[in-house]
Image (tube, rainbow, N blue to C red):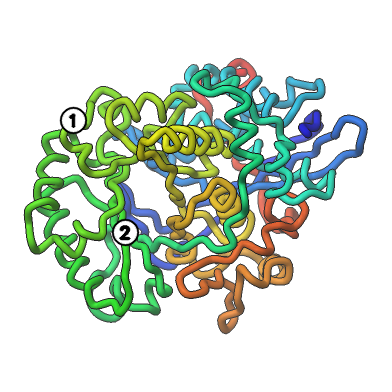
Amino acid sequence: MPLRLAVRDISFFERPVTFARPFRFGAVAINATPQAFVRVEIEVEGKSRAVGASAEFLVPKWFDKRPHLAPDQTVEELRCSLLIARGIYLAHSGFETAFGLHAACIGAQIEACAREDIPPLAAGYGPAEIDKAILDALLRCTGTGFFDGMANNIAGVDARLSRDLGDDDVSRFLAGRKRLERVAIRHTVGMDDKVEGEGGVADIRENAGARYFKLKLNGDPAHDADRLMRIGNELATLSYDYRVTLDANEQYADLTALNALVERLDRDAALRPIAQKLLYIEQPMPRDITRQSPLGALARRDFIVDEADDSYDAFPVTRALGYRGISSKSCKGIYKSIINATRAARWSAAGEKCFIAGEDLTCQAGLAVQQDLALGALIGVTHAERNGHHYVDGFGDTPAAEAEAFLAGHPDLYVRDGNKIRLAIHDGDLLTGSLTTPGFATATHPDWSAMSPLAQPTARIPLEKAV
């Protein structure tokens, strides 16, 4: 049964994270980036107060890839999105369900951010992080785990933001969910990652025994095809079966360039180790071109959208263009993922192939990876990109005592490796058993004293006027 709550306080913090190796996707290479942390205090109607938390990287040049913006400017946008959302959420002082509060705020958030020239995908970052922390607090206040709480729709998720669904569609979907006990990792192969030999894609010390691989593309069909041949030759040496996905991060300029790659995949024998194992191609073209370009004959392959998923209507719109799937990322909003998973289940039940995929914007060990993993395990994502464990050395710059607390609270999810604590990968899978703890998939919170307040962005207009 949904409970009502009121948000009493929202605080933001951040901590620098240094990568163990460069992560290149699209037109940017990341060597380090801050991780944002959200701490909220809520009052649950008729009960008590509780504190919740969430975390996510402030990733440059993904939420907004406009070429005139420097990477640091796009990080500033995300900080601004958080601060604008804080004002909007705190302005709603009455009691409301967790989803009702989200629904009441998301439109004002998009409008306020637009006045700051912040696009919808980046605008959604602030509410996404606040919503996760609110849900954590709500579950902690009631002593409820995430999976049981969502099966009973404790957040009050309904169809008010998705007119193609009814409230019963959402409640039935949630009521029928069973936690996936295991979620396979999908190993990311960035554009700068080594392909052959020691440290290459087939090296088990590098890929952690993954059976799924996510291969980044740069938008040049000839270059991508050549690189995929090299990767395919390496993956063909594995002693077990594997599957791949391709991700262009909006780098293919148009349908003509995309068709050139797909033609190579269909016809070039040298690409068979990739083409025969290919599950789907992710976000090949820029988000604006995506919404204007029906896939046509290209839809013989499965395509999904990711960066183009910037609103509640993105999945129905792109489905009509030939896309079969959409990504789930908690940084884009847990409730939108649930709505999209409901849609995929409903359309699939009617005989159409539709699905939701698990993608990872470098979720760091701790809160971020646990909450995103739990979301996927709830909505039925059987394998998910998990690149945080690959590009960051364990818990990275997290204080040792904090990492130890996460290991103690989630011994099935982390393992001690020398002087580091890192994700425990079991035959290519992550286990979700400890994510059933009261709260949103975490038995512990970070050490708030060991991080800095969120850096204040240089806003183009005063934030109080944006709100």
Residue drawn where x is 58% and y is 76% of the image: 420
Q: Is residue 462 visible?
A: no
In this rendering, the answer to whether 280 lies above or below 21 is above
Give the left or right position of residue 428, taking residue 234 as reference.
Answer: right
Which residue position holds label 2? 190
| Earlier sequence position, callout 2 versus callout 1 | 2
Q: CA distance from mark 2 to mark 1?
A: 29 Å
Residue type at the position of mark 1: Gly
Residue drawn where x is 47% and y is 56% of the image: 382
Which residue position holds label 1? 296
- Please, what secondary structure does the residue beneath circle 2 have? loop
The x, y position of residue 6, in whole percent, is 80, 28
* Mark 2 and mark 1 residues within 8 Å of each other at the beta carbon: no
Which quadrant holds residue 319?
A: top left
Which quadrant holds residue 160?
A: top right
Q: Quadrant of the N terminus?
A: top right
Q: Nearer the viewer, residue 315 or 386?
A: 315
